[in-house]
Amino acid sequence: QVQLVESGGGLVQAGGSLRLSCAASGRTFITYAMGWFRQAPGKEREFVAANSKSGGSTYYADSVKGRFTISRDNAKNTVYLQLNSLKPEDTAVYYCAATMAPYSSWWYDSKKYDYWGQGTQVTVSS
């Protein structure tokens, strides 16, 4: 069992930055690949970024590539999402999630994730 708690969301102007954190409970954090998803009002949840258990491999949605950075600190059981050059269309609830899915190609699919946080709101004003 893994519990995930996100923090760091807020209101920011377009072009600004935020850093989201996701703290995981338990001593098995390193056995999970971690992902970030987001869901805007009236839209489906979409993949944002994921990284491997070691953090050595990262994957991004095209819409955030070059602007967002996922990282993790296994000693602190925490995964981060740095959001730079934010746009109004980035406004959404951001969720972190943990998966034991063995293939990186699966990490884009929200159905492959085993545990989810409660989400943190990111609002970007124009």
Image: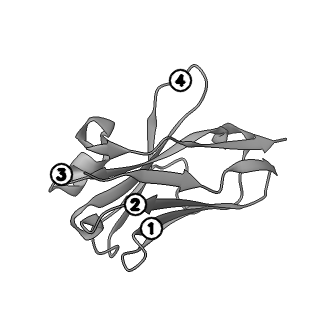
User: Which is in the foreground here, disc 3 or disc 1?
Assistant: 1
Residues at marks 1 and 4, CA–CA distance in whole angstroms: 27 Å
Residue 60 image position (x, y, % from top left): 43, 55
- Which label's residue is closer to the chain start, 2 or 3? 2
How busy is the neighbourhood of tag 2: few (under 14 within 10 Å), some, or many (20 plus)? many
Q: Which of marks 3 and 1 is nearer the N terminus?
A: 1
- Across and down, in percent, residue 47 comes to 42, 43
Marks 2 and 1, the one that precedes in the sequence: 2
Give the labeled residue for mark 1. 78
Q: Which of marks 3 and 4 is nearer the N terminus?
A: 4
Q: Which residue is drawn at 45% across and 65% down?
A: 79
Mark 4 residue type: Lys
Circle 3: is it few (<14), some (14-19), or many (20+) Cα within 10 Å? some
Query: What residue would you read off at disc 4?
Result: 43
Do tag 1 and tag 4 residues touch (Cβ < 8 Å)? no
Label disc, if present, on residue 24 of the rendered structure: 2
What kind of residue is marked 3?
Answer: Ala
Q: Earlier in the sequence, mark 2 or mark 4?
A: 2
Amino acid marked by disc 1: Thr
- Mark 2 secondary-structure assignment: strand
- In the picture provided, is 10 more to the left or to the right than 112? right
Packing grade of label 4 (10 A; few <14, some 14-19, many >=20) is few
* On screen, residue 118 above or below 14: above
Instruction: Please tell me whether mark 3 sits on a helix, a strand or a loop.
Output: loop
Q: Quadrant of the C terminus?
A: top right
The relative height of residue 28 versus residue 105 in the rendered view (above or below) is below
**Label 3: which residue?**
101
